[in-house]
Amino acid sequence: MNLAFNLARDRSGLTGDNPSVGCVIVKNDEIISIGQTGLKGTPHAEFNAIKSCRKNLKGSTLYVSLEPCTHYGKTPPCSKLIIKSKIKKVIFSIIDIDKRARGKSIKLFKSKNILVKKGLLKKEGNKIY
């Protein structure tokens, strides 16, 4: 999660109206991909990490500094891409403050048998958001 925080901090102030987010994907105790929010806010960190990964994501764990989005906006929902990628566990630090997303990914992921954990290193995450 600390790497995800560092990726988020790296883009702070460069992501327009969207929050700067960092994402790390791990499989078999190895980092297989990283991503951060694109300049001006798109694509999102999760999208960048998933799309740049050269390995099979099935069974992997996704660490992300902020709860993945579940709504359509300038981009499609990251949560749907996570589900499609067959990631087995999602761990995030901070619940999104945006009412369109706030807490919604938890229910969605659980309904798809994806393990989800919120609040990892929350104190550190709150310093970013």
Image (cartoon, rainbow, N blue to C red):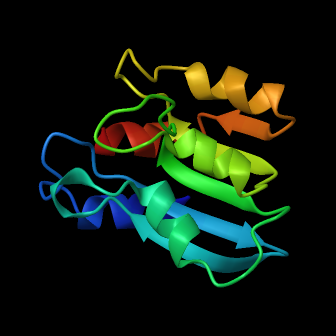
Marks counted in the figure total 0
**Nearer the observer, 109 or 61:** 109
Rendered location of residue 3, percent (x, y): 49, 68
Residue 117 drawn at (x, y percent): 71, 37
- Residue 8 sits in quarter: bottom left
Q: Nearer the viewer, residue 45 or 30?
A: 45
Direction from residue 108 to residue 72 in the image, left or right: left
* Furthest residue toward bottom: 54
Q: In the figure, is residue 45 to the left or right of 68?
A: left
Left or right, 98 with respect to 23, comes to left
Residue under the image location 61 percent in, 28 percent down: 105
The image quadrant where one finds the N terminus is: bottom right
The part of the image, by quadrant, that contains residue 61 is bottom right
Q: Which residue lies furthest to the top in this view?
A: 99
Q: Does residue 117 show up? A: yes
Q: Is residue 30 above or below residue 65?
A: below
Give the percent coordinates (x, y) of residue 112: 82, 33
* Quarter in which the C terminus is drawn: top left
Give me the residue at 49% from left, 28% from top: 95
Tell me if residue 118 comes above or below residue 44 in the rendering: above
Q: Is residue 3 visible?
A: no
Q: Percent from the top left, x then y, of residue 69?
A: 47, 35
Q: In this view, does 118 lie above or below 65?
A: above
